Image: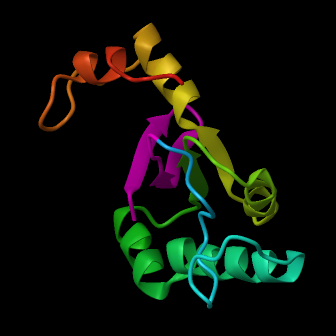
Amino acid sequence: MDILAIKPTANGIQCRHLEVQASSKPIGYITPSPKGYIKHRSDEELQNSVSEWVRKKYGQPKKAKQRKALFDGPWTRHLVVHKIKYPKELDLIRKAGITVHNLSEVIDILRRGNTVVSKAAGADFVDLVTGFDKS
């Protein structure tokens, strides 16, 4: 699990399980196939690899137990991506109930300063955000 986030709101508790797949260069497939990371996949292979990836990233009992230990209620599932080569894969991830966010949009929100976070572990948060390459 990359990030588990809990936020109290006027309407209750919001809980998010976020996975992040961000690289400065476009990556191939996000989801591995049983054959490893191959360049071209059939629709069936892609669907199977997405299903397995979603199960591993969000559905394992150990991860469910950890989420429940933090908050015993509903959790939404999210994926943050940067540069992706195969948008069809993201479409299948979305169809699996995962909300997909683009890292550049997240950085834009953080740049606006409407957050409660002022620092990140190991680095000045402002430097991290202002130094982010949008290309």
Instruction: Locate the N terminus and report the quarter of the image it occupies.
Output: bottom left
Does the rendering let one see residue 27? yes
- Residue bounds of the magenta highlight: 1-24
Dominant SS type (magenta): strand
Magenta includes 66? no
- Looking at the picture, how far across and down is residue 20, in whole percent? 47, 52
47 up-or-down from 85: above or below: below
**Image position of 34 with respect to 43: above or below:** below
Residue 9 on image: x %, y %: 50, 34
Using the rendered image of the protein, determine whether residue 116 is visible from the camera's viewpoint. no
Residue drawn at x 62%, y 90% is 34
Would residue 31 be found to the left or right of residue 16 on screen? right
- Viewer-proximal residue among 95 and 73: 95
Residue 117 percent coordinates (x, y): 29, 24
Q: Is residue 23 magenta?
A: yes
Task: Work out which residue is located at the far bottom of the displayed protein and give it.
Answer: 34
Q: Nearer the viewer, residue 67 or 57?
A: 57
The front one of 85 and 77 is 85
Image-quadrant location for residue 2 = bottom left
Q: Which residue is at a point 39% across and 19% down the rendered structure image? A: 115
- In the shown orientation, is residue 62 left or right of residue 131? right
The residue at the far top in this view is 112
The part of the image, by quadrant, that contains residue 12 is: top right
The residue at the point 43 percent across, 23 percent down is 133
- Residue 62 horizontal side relative to residue 42, left or right: left
**Taking 96 as reference, is 70 left or right?**
left
Residue occupying the point 53% across, 80% down: 56
Image position of 72 with respect to 113: above or below: below
Q: Pick the quarter of the image with the C terminus.
A: top right
Closest to the observer, 44 or 17: 44
Q: In the image, residue 3 lies at what x, y percent? A: 39, 54
Q: How many marks?
A: 0
